[in-house]
């Protein structure tokens, strides 16, 4: 139902009305039967309480399928939805930004075998705005209200206007999928999309991040290992308390308080309580916990202090290449330019054509010999899909073999008395794409 006029139609109510939230086993069984008997793809979405609760669990799951309508399921009283996941196992799931929801869906027993990611489809099409609202607007001509996206979805009971917002998020998701699939087919990119979707569906659950405390906001201000240890100890003390209270860690202790304590290194609980970021009632209540973390970091022997930088098995930052490995720097510059040209020609974001890390690793330590086949195999080992390898391997091999940019053409011989230059500046070339 693509609209061709410029005016977007506000989408205010679900076409079938707002369904009751599924909160008990009997209603869940009826919902599973209805969705199993329906046909076509199933639209799936989940609402979390990021910024309010610990972790990223789902607090509402929305489904819509032709013949079954819309269902809103509360996974708090119904934490095991594996029967629903099994009933939909042979169905294509339509999600927007699938990687954001797959983990919380897996926690309740729902994992797709096949999926269609509308956000990724928009990226492959080179569309300028790929959020759900802008896509529904530009592709289908309907305006979604997005005012509750950052709400605390752990609230019970959920307000009716929040539930309406949640139901509308899946209202047109299958129609959006169909329209985007048609565009992908017309652009010759549908095969690319299928490879991307299959890779997302098959991806293993993400492993916990190493040294998660290094993501503390303001870490760039910390310059020595002892202070890094303070950040680490406070981060883990906060995480333990946040888990116990089921609160977002930032609501237990702000990142700014962790960084300030590491910079100040208070020598007593009293000195810590005098710091502005620790004067609040909740911080004073847990002062022994926070100062204990600082004291633990102070007492660590040097050999147990964290390294200044996180362990990393890849190449150094490219800014250091020119002096350390000028040949690698030349390879990276040439390959970035070629990959950028290919991305532009195919109307793709360059990061969706080839990840910057993959290209950097190849330029730093290319295979020997650096043939297109060898480079393609290196890309494949880093998770690149076949369509990406087909588009880039030959060009990157050529860039590695001929990294020096071509010499500029010699200007024509100037006349004895050149005319005065015209006003204005020369036309600028396109910026070098980042990789």
Image (spheres, rainbow, N blue to C red):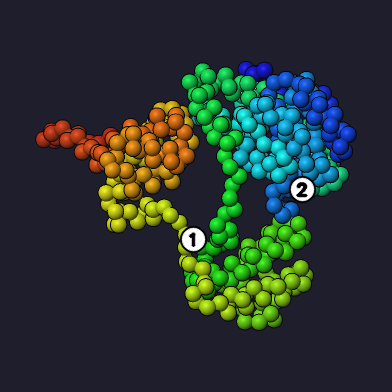
Q: Position of residue 58 (x, y in %)?
A: 73, 44
- Which mark is nearer the camera, 1 or 2? 1
**Relative depth, front residue between 388 and 207:** 207
Query: Furthest-left residue in view?
Result: 416
The answer to whether one can see residue 252 in this image is: no
Residue 78 quadrant: top right
Q: Position of residue 205 (x, y in %)?
A: 61, 44
The residue identified by callout 1 is 310
Determine the secondary structure under disc 1.
loop
**Relative depth, front residue between 13 and 8:** 13
Residue 276 quadrant: bottom right
The residue identified by callout 2 is 152
Residue ID at (74%, 53%):
53
Direction from residue 203 to residue 76 in the image, left or right: right
Direction from residue 50 to residue 394 in the image, left or right: left
Q: Quadrant of the N terminus?
A: top right
CA–CA distance in space, label 1 to label 2: 33 Å
Residue ID at (38%, 35%):
376
Determine the secondary structure under disc 2.
loop
Asked if residue 319 is positioned above or below residue 287 in the image, the reply reads above
Q: Position of residue 300 (x, y in %)?
A: 56, 77
């Amino acid at each position: 139902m693509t609209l061709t006029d410029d005016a977007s139609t506000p989408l205010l109510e679900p076409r079938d009305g707002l369904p009751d939230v599924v909160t008990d086993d009997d209603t869940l069984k009826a919902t599973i039967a209805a969705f199993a008997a329906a046909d076509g793809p199933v639209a799936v979405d989940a609402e979390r309480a990021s910024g309010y609760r610990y972790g990223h669990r789902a607090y509402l799951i929305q489904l819509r399928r032709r013949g079954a309508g819309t269902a809103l399921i509360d996974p708090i009283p119904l934490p095991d939805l594996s029967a629903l996941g099994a009933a939909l196992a042979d169905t294509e799931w339509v999600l927007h930004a699938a990687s954001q929801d797959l983990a919380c869906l897996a926690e309740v027993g729902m994992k797709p075998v096949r999926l269609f990611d509308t956000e990724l489809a928009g990226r492959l099409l080179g569309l300028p705005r790929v959020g759900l609202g802008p896509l529904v607007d530009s592709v289908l001509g309907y305006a979604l209200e997005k005012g509750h996206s950052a709400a605390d979805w752990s609230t019970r009971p959920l307000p009716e206007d929040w539930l309406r917002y949640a139901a509308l998020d899946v209202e047109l998701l299958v129609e959006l999928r169909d329209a985007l699939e048609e565009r992908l087919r017309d652009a010759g990119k549908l095969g690319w999309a299928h490879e991307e979707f299959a890779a997302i569906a098959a991806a293993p659950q993400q492993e916990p991040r190493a040294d998660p405390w290094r993501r503390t906001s303001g870490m760039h201000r910390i310059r020595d290992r002892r202070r890094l240890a303070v950040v680490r100890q406070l981060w883990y003390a906060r995480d333990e308390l946040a888990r116990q209270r089921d609160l977002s860690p930032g609501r237990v202790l702000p990142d700014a308080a962790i960084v300030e304590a590491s910079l100040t290194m208070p020598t007593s609980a009293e000195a810590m309580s005098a710091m502005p970021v620790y004067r609040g009632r909740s911080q004073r209540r847990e002062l022994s916990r926070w100062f204990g973390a600082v004291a633990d970091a102070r007492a660590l022997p040097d050999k147990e202090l964290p390294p200044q930088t996180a362990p990393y098995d890849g190449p150094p930052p490219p800014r250091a290449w020119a002096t350390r490995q000028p040949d690698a720097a030349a390879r990276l510059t040439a390959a970035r330019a070629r990959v950028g040209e290919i991305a532009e020609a195919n109307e793709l974001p360059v990061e969706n054509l080839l990840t910057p890390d993959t290209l950097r690793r190849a330029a730093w330590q290319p295979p020997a010999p650096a043939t297109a086949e060898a480079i393609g195999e290196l890309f494949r080992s880093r998770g690149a899909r076949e369509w990406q390898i087909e588009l880039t391997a030959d060009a990157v091999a050529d860039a590695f073999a001929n990294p020096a940019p071509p010499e500029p053409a010699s200007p024509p011989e100037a006349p004895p008395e050149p005319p005065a230059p015209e006003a204005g500046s020369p036309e600028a070339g396109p910026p070098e794409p980042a990789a």
